Image (tube, helix red, strand yellow):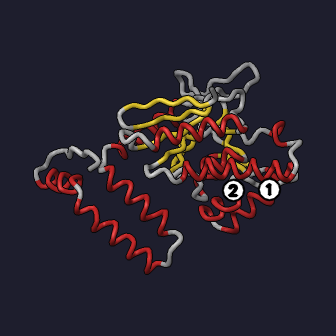
Amino acid sequence: MMIDMEKKDGVAVITINNPPMNVLCTALLNELDKALDDIGSDPAIRTVVLTGAGRAFVAGADIKEMMDLDPEGALAFAHLGHGVLRKLEQLPIPVIAAVNGFALGGGTEMALACDIRIASEAAKFGQPEVSLGVIPGFGGTQRLTRLVGSGKAKELIYTGDIINAKAAQSIGLTQQVVEGYKKDENGERIRNEKGKPVQDNEPVLKAAMDMATKIASKGPVAMKNAKKAMDEGLDMTLANGLEHEAKLFSGLFATKDQKEGMAAFVEKREPDFRGE
């Protein structure tokens, strides 16, 4: 198994675990596809956290699997990646990427399919596919452009440059950067026998879990409608998007969650949302 999943208190944590660098291969993508189906059919899950085990979030697609593909095989592989990442993107609940280390190529593309990206300071992002004689094939040319703008996306894709977490945050690729290295009692980074700082995945996972838990405490029907309004509104004119928002907003007034949420506010107590 290359996908680990744990469910607790309304949060599903998916961990990519394909050592040493969590590369995306056909078998892993098929496992992830099944895990997403499981989450999508579980009404108890209100938020998802996606992360990687070890030094990488996802260090890219499996070059050894791709190198001998012909155009037909490459098209099938791209369609598989598109389908799985689209399923991730279209989950009706919020998805948070806890990017713990290398997120290159398919790793950046997987993070882009999430709603929110929290990065460890050890994280590295990039679309280096042109260095291999190809282009991003799992959505990078489309999602990166939409997220950071055409000019910056073209710069990153044309050059194949790899950027750190702070640079990623400065262009809006990540929303938060947290500590990513183990420290001694003096606050200095602990280094291994090669003199490199020792990576610590706990802070980024904690930050993602804290946010996921907070989101899971809110009205789940409202949360799904908020995501629907924002995601679908991107493909509409402003006028149509505003009307879409108004319909989703007004429809929530027929839910038990809306009655409970507003009653709890007036009564100065915590709401007990049931997703109804």
Q: Nearer the viewer, residue 5 or 52?
A: 5
Q: Image check: 47 left or right of 167? A: left
Say which residue label 2 marks. Answer: 140
Q: How packed is label 2: few (under 14 Cα within 10 Å), some, or many (20 or more)?
A: many
Relative side of 275 to 6, left or right = left
Camera-nearest residue between 250 and 113: 250
Q: Is residue 100 left or right of residue 260?
A: right
Identify the residue at horizontal 37%, vertical 46% (top origin). 215
Three-letter amino acid code at disc 2?
Gly
- Based on the displayed image, in which of its 4 quarters is residue 16 positioned? top right
> Mark 2 to mark 1: distance in Å?
9 Å
Residue farthest top in this picture:
193
Q: Are marks 2 and 1 in contact (CB under 8 Å)?
A: yes
Q: Nearer the viewer, residue 229 or 115?
A: 229
Instruction: Label 1: state its secondary structure.
Output: loop
Q: Quadrant of the N terminus?
A: top right
Disc 2 element: helix
Residue 122: x, y in percent?
63, 37
For the point 18% across and 56% down, the residue is: 259
For the point 42% across and 65% down, the residue is: 229
The type of residue carrying mark 1 is Ile
Q: Residue 135's mark?
A: 1
**Residue 225 on image: x %, y %:** 37, 59
Q: Does residue 4 sit above or below 219 in this rendering?
A: above
